[in-house]
Amino acid sequence: MSRVALEHVDKTYPNGFVAARDLSLEAADGELLVLVGPSGSGKSTVLRLMAGLERVSDGVIRIGERDVTDLPPQQRDIAMVFQNYALYPHMTVRENLGFGLSIRKQPRAIIEDRVRTVAASLGLEALLDRKPAQLSGGQRQRVALGRAIVREPLAFLFDEPLSNLDAQLRVETRVELSRLHRKLGATMVYVTHDQSEALTLGDRIAVLKEGVLQQIASPMKLYEEPANKFVAGFIGSPGMNFFEGVLTRIGTGGVCTFQGADFTIRVPCESGTNGRVILGIRPQHLEITDDSARGDGVVRAEVGVVEPMGNEQIVYVTLPNGERAVAIAPVQPRITAGEKVSIRVRPEGIHIFDAGSGRRMAR
């Protein structure tokens, strides 16, 4: 298997839409790299550029050490799996799995051996003589995966392959993909809008916004040390809460006071920090306490909506100035809509972002 690298790639469509801007990233040999971002961020376009289905406006694409920028898809030795399966309806599972090898004029014995091996690894042995119309969505997706694996390409490209499956099948197939990646040791680039898929599948995650790479890092580093406010708000569910306020340095001890619209809290801060900032706090670091609680980092709030999740409650509250926030609370005591509560900000979970650039500030 081989690395897949983009070097200073630009992609601008004839109508002026910029899908990639000076984009450089690399999926290392054997790595599963996940591309995430909102609709229009350019993640699917990047995958199509890697596959050769779109041409770059500028820059270089390499697979291994080979420059494939101007090569057509069939000469790049990659396999792509789409969300719509793209199976041939008139062919059996066996024929679909072996089709790529057949058009490359591989000997029948090799085709049959590879199809049998891949079918066994994906649990498709009993389905080999069925046609796609006789399969469930999950089975069809496994056939699409198998067809890619049979070819033994340099790299696999996945374009939201699980988006057509129901919730349970998504989880099951996600686990299967992780197992396959470990078994094959293959280079994979995977596009999704689903954070759970990104955080659980990826060795690393690349976050895109309007064609620009915001951050590329391991799932936990991305979650714990987001590079900017956009990444912090995009990664994690429910999303991070943001409060605008003023940061004032206290003495020389590396401590600042954050003064928001509804609460004040002391936080660690870097040398020279002062001025308007945005404080970010994830829902699990907002602690719901008795309404009588007061003190540093405490704000009164009114409960709007409560979503029971079995092992926790997701609580949506409104602060006195009208700002809204989300907290995650234990299942007991039960919290009800309309209830008055106090919210305590736990300082260990705080992130501070520059109000102008959105850049995360060191603490």
Image: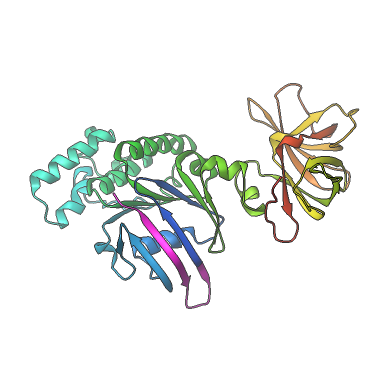
Magenta stretch contains residue 227: no
Q: Is residue 274 above or below residue 180?
A: below
Magenta stretch contains residue 2: yes
Q: Position of residue 165 (x, y in %)?
A: 44, 42
Q: Kindly identify the residue that appears in the image at 31 percent across and 40 percent down.
A: 135
Q: Kindly identify the residue that appears in the image at 14 percent across and 46 percent down.
A: 111
Left or right: 237, with 304 as reference point: left
Our reading of the magenta stretch's main secondary structure is strand
In terms of depth relative to the viewer, which is nearer, 169 or 34? Answer: 34
Across the whole image, how many numbered discs are drawn on residues? Answer: 0
Q: Kindly identify the residue that appears in the image at 47 percent across and 78 percent down.
A: 14
Q: Position of residue 169 (x, y in %)?
A: 43, 36
Q: Kindly identify the residue that appears in the image at 64 percent across and 30 percent down.
A: 309
The color scheme shown is rainbow
Q: Is residue 205 visible?
A: yes
Q: Is residue 306 visible?
A: no
Q: Read off the magenta span.
A: 1-20
Q: Position of residue 228 (x, y in %)?
A: 65, 53
In terms of depth relative to the viewer, which is nearer, 84 or 258? Answer: 258
Q: Position of residue 200 (x, y in %)?
A: 48, 38
Left or right: 184, with 302 as reference point: left
In terms of depth relative to the viewer, which is nearer, 23 or 293? Answer: 23
Q: Is residue 97 above or below residue 342?
A: below
Q: Quadrant of residue 338?
A: top right
